């Protein structure tokens, strides 16, 4: 890799990390090309990025970012997953780790705080932002629907009573 390519890699990665809210670091040794491509595609589909990294260059990119505390995780064959969605990288990485024994999560960072495997697993169980929005809309609209049905009910009861009475009068004639 040329020096200019290395500088570009470091600058691009630093920019991506500054926009990310979480980073997951994993060892990927032993994964096939197909498995790695599958992981990249799944990350992309969930709004996250996955990169196999050069440790020295990644440590340079981490300098002066909120993720500087995780530089010690970059030993051996490492890869990173990151996104501005706090939950997506952890969810995909945890699912992938369950499927493939050669993929091992070694740590990460959430909003600048170094996190371990337990916190990553906890993040993976949280609902997505879209899921939270859906629940919130359901909670907000539920009382309005109940009020509307309560307000409609007396009118509906009156209409049923009048229909029933008119049917009785119609039969007696």
Image (tube, grey):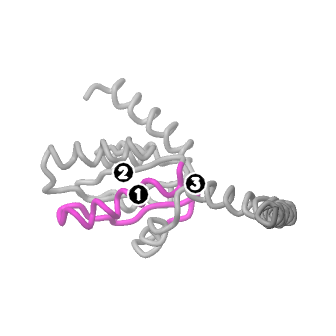
Q: Residues within 10 Å of mark 2 (few under 14, many from 20)?
A: many
Q: Who's the residue at 50% across and 44% down the image?
A: 17
Q: Could you tell me residue 52's position as x and y percent?
A: 28, 45
Q: Which of the two discs, 3 and 2, labels the residue nearer the N terminus?
A: 2
Position of the C terminus, as image quadrant, is bottom right
What residue is disc 1 on?
24
Q: Give the magenta range.
A: 85-114
- The residue carrying pointer 3 sits among few (fewer than 14), some (14 to 19) or many (20 or more) residues within 10 Å by Cα, namely few
The residue pinned by badge 3 equals: 129
Q: Which mark's residue is nearer the viewer, 1 or 3?
A: 3
Q: Is residue 164 left or right of 47 when viewed as pictured?
A: right
Residue 49 image position (x, y, % from top left):
40, 43
Residue 95 within the segment the image draws in magenta: yes
Q: Please, is residue 136 above or below residue 44 in the view?
A: below
Label 1, label 2: how far apart the Cα atoms are: 6 Å
Vertical relation: 133 (above or below) 61: below
Q: Nearer the viewer, residue 103 or 11?
A: 103
Q: Residue at x 55, y 52 (%)?
A: 21
Residue 33: x percent and y percent?
15, 44
Relative placement, left or right, of 49 versus 151 is: left
Task: Give the residue at the far front of this rendering.
Answer: 173
**Residue at image mark 2:** 80
Residue 97: percent from left, percent from top: 27, 64
Quarter of the N terminus within the rendering: top left
Badge 1 or badge 3: first in the primary sequence? 1
The residue at 76%/64% (across/down) is 171
Which residue appears at 54% of the width and 46% of the height? 84
Compare marks 1 and 2 and give the one earlier in the sequence: 1
Q: Under tag 2, what secondary structure?
A: strand
28 relative to 61 in the view: left or right: left
Contact, mark 3 vs mark 2 (Cβ under 8 Å): no
């Amino acid at each position: 890799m040329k020096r200019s390519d290395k500088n570009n890699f470091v600058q691009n990665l630093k920019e991506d990390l500054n926009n990310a809210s979480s980073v997951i670091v994993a060892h990927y040794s032993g994964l096939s090309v197909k498995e790695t491509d599958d992981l990249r595609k799944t990350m992309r589909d969930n709004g996250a990025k996955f990169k196999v990294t050069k440790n020295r260059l990644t440590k340079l990119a981490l300098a002066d970012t909120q993720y500087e505390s995780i530089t010690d995780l970059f030993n051996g064959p490492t890869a990173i997953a990151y996104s501005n969605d706090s939950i997506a990288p952890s969810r995909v990485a945890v699912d992938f780790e369950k499927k493939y024994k050669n993929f091992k999560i070694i740590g990460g960072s959430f909003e600048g705080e170094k996190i371990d495997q337990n916190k990553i697993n906890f993040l993976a169980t949280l609902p997505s932002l879209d899921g939270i929005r859906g629940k919130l809309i359901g909670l907000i609209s539920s009382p309005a629907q109940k009020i509307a049905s309560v307000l409609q009910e007396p009118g509906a009861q009156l209409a049923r009573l009048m229909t029933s009475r008119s049917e009785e009068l119609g039969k007696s004639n």
